[in-house]
Each structure stands twice: as C-alpha cells, then as structure tokens.
Image (cartoon, rainbow, N blue to C red):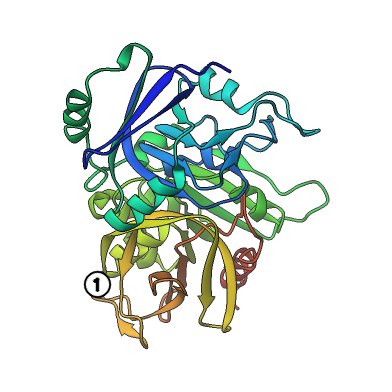
Amino acid sequence: MTTDQAVLVLENGDVYRGQAYGARGETFGEIVFNTGMTGYQETLTDPSYFKQIVVMTAPHVGNTGMNNEDAESRRIWVAGYIVRDPARRPSNWRSQRGLEDDLVDQGIVGLSGIDTRKLTRTLRSSGTMRAGIFSGAALAEDATLVARVTASEPMLGAHLADQVSIDGDYVIEPPEGVDMVAHVVAVDLGIKAMTPELMAARGIKVTVAPSSWSADEILALKPDGVFFSNGPGDPGVADRSVAVVRGILDAKVPLFGICFGNQLLGRALGYGTYKLRFGHRGINQPVMDRTTGKVEITSHNHGFAVDAPLDGPSESPNGYGRVVVSHVCLNDDVVEGLQCLDRPAFSVQYHPEAAAGPHDAAYLFDRFLDLMKGR
C-alpha cells in the first residue's frame, strides 16, 4: 500500500490532508457518512451511492477483503471512498483480494488517515455538501480546489436512476424445489442483487425491468405485483418514474416500493419530498412498524424523504384514497413507510433485503406476497 498524499476539500472550505487510498486522481460528489460497522462491499456496490463520496464512521475498514459473491451489482458505484485506518492485509477465509485492489481496478479515488470522527461531526452539524478528493497529479492550491468543488454538480435536482439502471430485462426464477406462486416485475432504479433473490426464495418469479419501461410495458406482462427498487438521486425531478407508479396505482395491481421507490410512491400519491440534512446511511437505524408496534433495526441509504402527515389517515392529494404512515424513524420521526388503505400498495424507506445488515425487515417480502394473494 502506497502512502502518497491526498486531500479532501469540502465546499465550506474545510481541507483534510491524508494518504491516497485506491486510485489516484480526482473525484467530486456529495459527501455522506455511513454508520455501518461492516458490509463495506455491499455499500460500495449499492447503486444508491452513485455520485456520492462515502465516509465510513467505523475506524478500521477492509479486514475481511473482497470476494465475488457479496457484490450487490455489477460494479462499484461510489464517487469516492474515505476510511480512517484501512486494513494492511485482508484476513478472512472468503477473501479473494484486498479492498484497495478493487478500488484501484475500478478507478475509485479514495483517502485514508484522516479524522473521520471530526468529519462526521461536521456533516451532522452543517449537513451533507459537495466535496472533492484529489491525489497524484490532481493536487493543487487549496483555493483552486475549493472553487472546483463549489462548481461541481449538487445532488439536489439530480436525476440519476436512469444512469444506474440496466438496459434490458432479465428473469430470476424460484430456486429448484420451490414452486412458483407469483410473478413480479421489479423496476430497476438501482436495484440490489439480493432483492430479487429474496423474492425468488419465496416462490416469486421476478422479471427485473429497466427504469425506462412505461406502465403499459410493465402491465403487458400481466404481473401479480410490481416492485419499485432503491436508487440514487432527487425524487423531486423523477417525473417519468412517478407517472409509471401512478399507472400501476390506476391499474390497481399490488405495488411495493423501497427507498427511492417509497419516495416515488409518495409523489405519485400527491405528497412532497424534501432533502434531509445529512440523511440515514448504515445498518443500525431504528424504525417502528406502527402496524405492529415492533421496533426494527434496519439498513438505510437515503438523503431524501416523503413529506406526509404522521398522525392518522390522510387523503391522497392525487385521489388514491386514504394513506397512513406505517413506519417512522425513532431518531428523528422521518416517514419510513406508507400504506394505502384504498389501493393495494405500500412502501418503506429502508432496505429490507439487508445486504448487508440485520434481517428484522425481511417480513416485508411476505407482506407483499400476502398482498398479491389478496390477504
């Protein structure tokens, strides 16, 4: 591992000097922090992190290496990666290479050796912001780098889901010995591989479709249900995807959305969305399921949220009947789930596929299956 200098520059003018980690060069993105103690491979390959520089709050990262089984998509999506103390060498029976090897191979510019605790406190108090990492030939005077960061693209107003979605559809069949009980079209807005696998394990045949498909194209397959996945970007500008969700609601086909899909359902129902100060990212976020009173520890990755009334049923502003907030975050009362009472549709703001993360929310796939069966 080399130790040449690298610099992190925030749009507020803060500068952190550390060591280059991963590829050398420069990168720009929205800087966010992830509170997970593990699961860094799943984080790196989660398309929801597209255009984001991820800071790991866990101080020691990389000790279990990387393998070919745990990737959640076809590549690493983060714009940049920051760790305090990278492992010198991986030590795990499943490891096939080091974390930095993959960062270098895929051109991910990173930084190590800085005070990530101080950086996280700054992001919590000032909010997420634009940032840049510079190393090698990209190093320059601080004032020049700050100007380049402030000129970079913000996350607010960014339409990104189409950039991470697949080009064509593919099918995940139930495993051998499991009878097919339903067919779901899963719209890939940045889907993670574990999501269709968990549905298939329950006997659901899953057709994963590009984000470009219209409601008519989806409904032409006569699915028993439609799933809208997680994904990156600002839901406030995803008008075409919102129209697709409305088409499914109009057809009264059972609908389940997670993360970005939750925000799209919220907009389709007529509610607004807004940008959180620093978002929820990690695998230790407490959420209450109001339908059962149970508290779940959940996996999150979102910087936007739905603005819907927390107390009692409210009428959908777009005419889809009554809607209740089914889940809330216990840290800050952010809306974490919606349930339609007059349409077969519900959603959550977090990641029930738990890759990586706790399995508290896996029941949501069973709830979706029950909805498709009319229960």
Quadrant position of residue 184: bottom right
Q: Residue 222 at what x, y percent from top left? A: 51, 55
Q: Residue 202 at what x, y percent from top left? A: 70, 59
Q: Is residue 96 left or right of residue 254?
A: right
Looking at the rendered image, the quarter that the C terminus falls into is: bottom right
Residue at the (35%, 81%) spot, across then down: 310
Res. 205 visible in picture: yes
Position above or below: 312 against 340: below
Q: Nearer the viewer, residue 18 or 56?
A: 18
Crowd around label 1: few <14 · some 14–19 · many ≥20 (10 Å): few
Q: Is residue 98 left or right of residue 300?
A: right
Q: Which residue is mark 1?
A: 318
Residue at the (49%, 60%) spot, across then down: 350
Q: Residue 58 at what x, y percent from top left? A: 56, 47
Position above or below: 48 against 371: above
Quadrant position of residue 90: top right
Q: Residue 174 at what x, y percent from top left? A: 71, 49
Position above or below: 174 against 210: below
Residue at the (24%, 55%) spot, across then down: 236
Looking at the rendered image, the quarter that the N terminus falls into is: top right
